[in-house]
Image: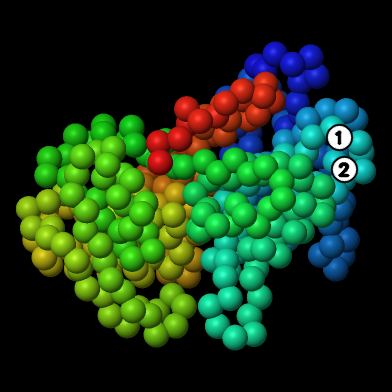
Amino acid sequence: MPTNQLTPKLFACRQSTVLAESIAKEYKTSLGKVKTTYFSDGEFQPAFEESVRGRRVFIIGSTFPNADNLMEMLLMLDAAKRASARHITAVMPYFGWARQDRKDQPRVAIGAKLVANLLQSAGATRIVTMDLHADQIQGFFEKPVDHLYASTIFMPYIKGLKLDNLTIASPDMGGSKRAYAYSKHLHSDVVICYKQRKKANVISHMELIGDVKGKNVILVDDMIDTGGTLAHAANLMMERGAISVRAICTHPILSGDAYEKIEKSGLTELIVSDTIPLKKQTSKIKVVSCAPLFADVMGKVQDNTSISGQFLM
């Protein structure tokens, strides 16, 4: 428990209640009480059922679709601000809308910047998140951002597998930096998949840069949505002579028929964190909790101590 006289209060958005309870347990406290009023048209209004005046408040919620999850975070931030909380930290294990981080075609929004503006306007004085889809999103904020890396929780799991002839792989060119960071700590080779898309979530062609014959391969990525890229990459690597292919993905969005694609693919297992709750359990998906990492960082934020020891990348 942090040593400051006024201990912080933790609250959960509805979509992240299970994760928030795990974080609170690691923090050795309990979640604050929130009452949500519902209207017949779908509108809702969260309200704190205890005083937050002068306190540091941590509001825990991943903002994966639908948009109600983001709206709930904004409403709770605004409520904390209007209730005179001293510091308001938005703890967003998964920062939604992050794929819209640039203007990559005419007449489109930069959704990640819009979300950053909304969070700050609502009252967030600090953001804690993990594995942003693009590092530059930190620069969209005028408030401090603690950008954590899931490698902190995944690295012990990888080492525990004790795989021989280990090779780290990136499923696309954009993830090569992440793959090289893992390989540096694991002293392994790196291969990269080069893919071309017809449109979002649809791959037209994929090629492998590097040799995987006789290797145990681990694909690393920040998120898995439809599962098409990872399934395609795993099948390609098995065709090229890999002994096994695993995947590590921080945020298990897993939309559409993603679960079926994973089950039918050449993946031995898919390792994910609990930033987004799974819709169902399958034999190939292993969950590693991020709760201890977030609880530790939140304690250090409260005590104004360094969190640099939590960075492996």
Q: Position of residue 176 (x, y in %)?
A: 33, 58
Quarter of the figure with the C terminus:
top left
Q: Which residue: 91% across, 36% down?
A: 84
Kind of residue at disc 2? Lys
Q: Residue 71: which disc? A: none
* Within-10-Å neighbours for mark 1: few <14, some 14–19, many 20+: many
**Is residue 87 toward the left or the right of residue 104 in the image?**
right
- Quadrant of the rendered image containing residue 213: bottom left
C-beta proximity under 8 Å, tags 2 and 1: yes
Q: Quadrant of the N terminus?
A: top right
Q: Position of residue 53 (x, y in %)?
A: 90, 30
Q: Can you tell which mark lies on residue 85?
A: 1
* Mark 1 residue element: loop
Q: Is residue 190 left or right of residue 65?
A: left
Label 2 sits on a secondary structure element that is: helix
Relative placement, left or right, of 101 versus 42 is left
Question: Can you give x and y, in whole percent of width and height, for residue 52 in the image?
Answer: 86, 31
Foreground residue among 79 and 19: 79
State the residue in front, 76 or 222. Answer: 222
Tell me how far mark 2 sits from mark 1, CA to CA.
Answer: 6 Å
Residue pointed to by mark 2: 81
Q: Amino acid at mark 1?
A: Ala
